[in-house]
């Protein structure tokens, strides 16, 4: 698509589409919209304090009017919940307290397997809440607990996305009793960013009764709204005269490491100790500056092994804490290559990220590179969302010292939309090296009032990257997405145009020189009063890629012929995937070591059957079978996920995958195995193992990771990693091993 036509198209949408997007984006609600429910936080008297024990027996809890009368979202939408919930909020100058009562008619049937901090609660009863402390209706904070005392949190982004890697400092105590389960929550105001001059926040609550498969909310119960869409939240009033302190966090840490690598010729053990420091300062209630000196990632979990049976590289997500903090302020519209629509049936399948933090501090061989220091400024200033990152790496492992800079700005417009810009710069400090830059512009128009109460989004972007030596032009990428995420219909259309020399300085692009067209549609009907079935899903993703001369490269259709979600929380999915591939010259043509002829075209169809049993059970399984033609032959894939929850805090997770590929050019079999026993004696302590083996790398890996949170914000880590190579003749031999300890201390002023 011509860039002038692209920009003209975006301007047309802004001018003529504005009426559809903006008619409800002003502060006034459409006629007939019910008022947002409200609750009032009660200020504690001088001398009153909370004994955090999960028992709401202090006098001030009785003075607080509870939020109650939750409404079902599942299974009987719009009806009162079958198990009542009450939420009270009190505060003093330094802390916010929530008192929660989850009444339950069968308290002996409560489910709470997970105890480890920030684990998902897909198997457990849970209570969740969100807070929009600036009343923007876009971003906010997410928290959840379960009857065993697990604590998890996240930062919410526009449209319901979340950054679950954020770790706020707060404390929860839970108590089970004959009435159900109760909780007391303490959140220091220093943990939250908010405007101290405003006394009203957005807030919402959701409760899950897992054995009944019941979801209920305080407000926003329609299925196209929900807990994470903050424009549907209720109101929390009365928070005045509170203190966020001086806004200074000091977090020193000390590490110790013992390392050897016999597989690389280093048989002796090297012992190292080091110090580091993280400083944070909040110059305004909504803006946070951070400095990390001698940044260390000793506690980072290892990547999950994958077997690559595609012609392109695999994606491994960021896991390092420093780069995950504030990541929502650096997002860009082109990164929506993931699942879209019900059941994850959508997505372009092509990665197009102008900024990907794993390009920083990890060399081309996947080995860590020393980070001397990093600085970050992230937050809000007026109607602007700001993210600025600067990192300097040291010369290490034959990699030169480099400076990395990322700057992101979003201007909020209307009530749920924005226009934005992104700049990245990579500067190798090596004679003759080229400084590389990337510039991107993007926009999002979004409303939750389309046709009264439906969601509609339009996003667009354009990017340019500086050329490598010998390249000339052809260094742009652009695209747009129209998204209609609703229930029971969900649809989207995504277009991308990526030129041959587009190579972002600190980005991740899996393919270039193409245009993609991806319409997606999903329909999820729910039969009434059916004893067995909760809902069906029928969907299709028609992903088509051409070269920039419009010759067909790939046609990858994913047809969800049938998906049944049962009231028992089990699921059955049947998929058919017709596919066309042209092996264009200059692109990958190897499948797990088997080389296919360049220039050939292939048409084949694959079939997938998967079953997912309810995670609430002590033993849950997810078997899957995929079969059919594959390029010049056939491929059969068998997978099994087995989760055993022996008791709360004692879990065993197992994943196996087997592939048998038979092509005219050769044959290969691949095996992948992962075993993860966990012991979680309390919400403050966990011991997690991750044992992995795959037959492609012929490597066995084991990581044992112990974490003790001896006080909120203060951690001790003990991490042991051991990797072996599997030689067909000599058997297993140690490749490398590392023992790391880390102590983190936090002090707030």
Image: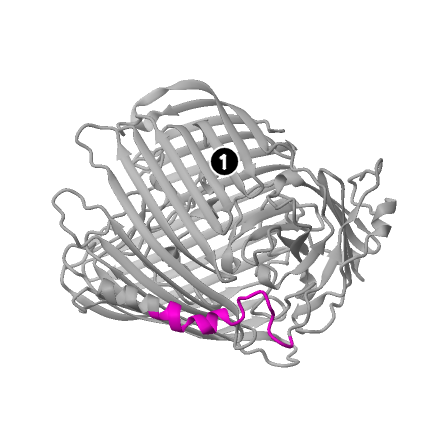
How many numbered markers are drawn?
1
Residue 31 part of the magenta segment: yes
Q: Quadrant of residue 568?
A: bottom right
Residue located farthest toward the bottom when viewing the structure as drawn: 528
The residue singled out by tag 1 in the image is 289
- Percent of width and height locating residue 654: 51, 50
Q: Residue at x 66, y 80 (%)?
A: 529
What kind of element bears circle 1? strand
Residue 662 in the image, given as x and y percentages of width and height = 26, 61
The quarter of the picture where the C terminus appears is top right
Residue 605 or residue 26, whichever sits in front: 26
Magenta stretch bounds: 12-32
Point 27% across, 30% down: residue: 399
Indicate the quadrant containing the N terminus: top left, top right, bottom left or bottom right. Answer: bottom left
- Above or below, 90 relative to 458: above
Q: Left or right: where does residue 309 sit relative to residue 64?
A: left
Q: Is residue 233 above or below residue 749?
A: below
The answer, for residue 447, to whether it is visible in the render is yes
Near mark 1 (Cα within 10 A), the count class, few <14, some 14-19 or many ≥20, is: many
Q: Nearer the viewer, residue 433 or 5?
A: 5
């Amino acid at each position: 698509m011509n860039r002038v036509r692209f920009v003209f198209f975006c301007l047309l949408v802004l001018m003529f589409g504005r009426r559809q997007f903006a008619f409800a984006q002003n502060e006034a609600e459409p006629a007939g919209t019910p008022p947002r429910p409200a609750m009032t936080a009660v200020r504690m008297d001088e001398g009153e304090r909370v004994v955090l024990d999960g028992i709401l027996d202090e006098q001030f809890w009785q003075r607080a009017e509870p939020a109650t009368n939750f409404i079902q979202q599942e299974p009987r939408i719009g009806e009162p919940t079958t198990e009542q919930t009450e939420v009270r909020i009190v505060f003093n100058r330094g802390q916010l307290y929530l008192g929660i009562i989850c009444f339950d008619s069968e308290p002996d049937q409560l489910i709470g397997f997970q105890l480890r901090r920030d684990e998902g609660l897909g198997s457990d009863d849970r209570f969740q809440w969100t807070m929009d402390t600036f009343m923007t209706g876009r971003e906010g904070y997410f928290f959840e607990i379960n009857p065993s005392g697990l604590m998890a949190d996240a930062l919410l982004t526009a449209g319901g996305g979340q950054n679950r890697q954020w770790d706020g400092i707060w404390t929860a105590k839970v108590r089970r009793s004959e009435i159900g389960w109760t909780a007391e929550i303490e959140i220091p105001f220093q943990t939250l960013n908010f405007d101290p001059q405003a006394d009203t926040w957005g807030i919402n609550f959701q409760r899950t009764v897992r054995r009944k498969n019941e979801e209920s909310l305080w407000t926003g119960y329609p299925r196209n709204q929900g807990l994470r869409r903050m424009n549907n939240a209720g109101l929390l009033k009365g928070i005045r005269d509170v203190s966020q302190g001086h806004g200074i966090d000091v977090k020193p840490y000390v590490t110790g490491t013992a390392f050897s690598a016999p597989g690389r010729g280093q048989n002796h053990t090297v012992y190292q100790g080091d110090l580091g420091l993280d400083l944070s300062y909040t110059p305004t209630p909504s803006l946070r500056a951070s400095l990390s000196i001698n940044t260390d990632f000793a506690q980072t979990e290892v990547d999950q092994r994958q077997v690559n049976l595609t012609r392109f590289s695999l994606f491994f997500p960021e896991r390092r804490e420093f780069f995950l903090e504030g990541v929502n302020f650096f997002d860009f519209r082109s990164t929506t290559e993931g699942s879209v629509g019900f059941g994850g049936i959508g997505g372009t399948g092509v990665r197009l990220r102008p900024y990907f933090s794993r390009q920083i501090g990890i060399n081309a061989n996947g080995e860590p590179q020393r980070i001397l220091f990093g600085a970050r400024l992230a937050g809000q200033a007026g109607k602007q969302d700001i993210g600025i990152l600067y990192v300097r790496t040291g010369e290490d492992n034959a990699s030169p010292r480099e400076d990395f800079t990322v700057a992101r700005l979003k201007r909020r417009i209307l009530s749920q939309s924005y226009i934005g810009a992104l700049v990245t710069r990579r500067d190798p400090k090596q004679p003759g090296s080229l400084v590389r830059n990337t510039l991107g512009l993007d926009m999002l128009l979004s409303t939750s009032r389309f046709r009264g109460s439906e969601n509609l989004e339009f996003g667009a972007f354009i990017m340019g990257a500086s050329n490598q030596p010998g390249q000339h032009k052809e260094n742009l990428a652009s695209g747009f997405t129209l998204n209609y995420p609703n229930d029971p219909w969900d649809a989207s259309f995504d277009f991308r145009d990526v030129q041959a020399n587009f190579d972002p300085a600190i980005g991740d692009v899996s393919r270039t020189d193409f245009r993609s067209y991806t319409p997606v549609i999903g329909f999820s009907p729910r039969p009434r009063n059916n004893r067995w079935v909760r809902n069906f899903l029928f969907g299709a993703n028609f992903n088509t890629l051409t070269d920039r001369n419009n010759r067909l490269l790939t046609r990858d259709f994913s047809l969800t012929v049938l998906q049944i979600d049962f009231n028992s929380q089990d699921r059955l999915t049947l998929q058919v995937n017709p596919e066309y591939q042209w092996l264009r010259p200059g692109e990958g043509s190897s499948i797990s070591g088997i080389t296919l002829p360049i220039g050939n075209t292939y048409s084949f169809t694959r079939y997938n059957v998967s079953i997912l049993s309810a995670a609430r059970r002590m033993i849950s399984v997810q078997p899957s079978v995929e079969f059919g033609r594959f390029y010049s032959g056939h491929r059969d894939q068998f997978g099994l996920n087995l989760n055993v929850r022996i008791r709360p805090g004692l879990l065993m997770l197992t994943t196996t995958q087997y592939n048998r590929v038979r092509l005219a050019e050769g044959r290969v079999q691949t095996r992948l195995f992962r075993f993860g026993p966990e012991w979680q004696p309390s919400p403050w302590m966990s011991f997690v193992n991750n044992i992995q083996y795959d037959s492609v790398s012929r490597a066995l890996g084991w990581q044992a990771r112990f974490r003790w949170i001896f006080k909120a914000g203060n951690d001790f880590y003990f991490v042991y990693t051991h990797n072996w190579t599997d030689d067909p003749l000599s058997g297993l031999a140690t490749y490398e091993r590392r023992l790391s300890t880390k102590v983190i201390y936090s002090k707030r002023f």
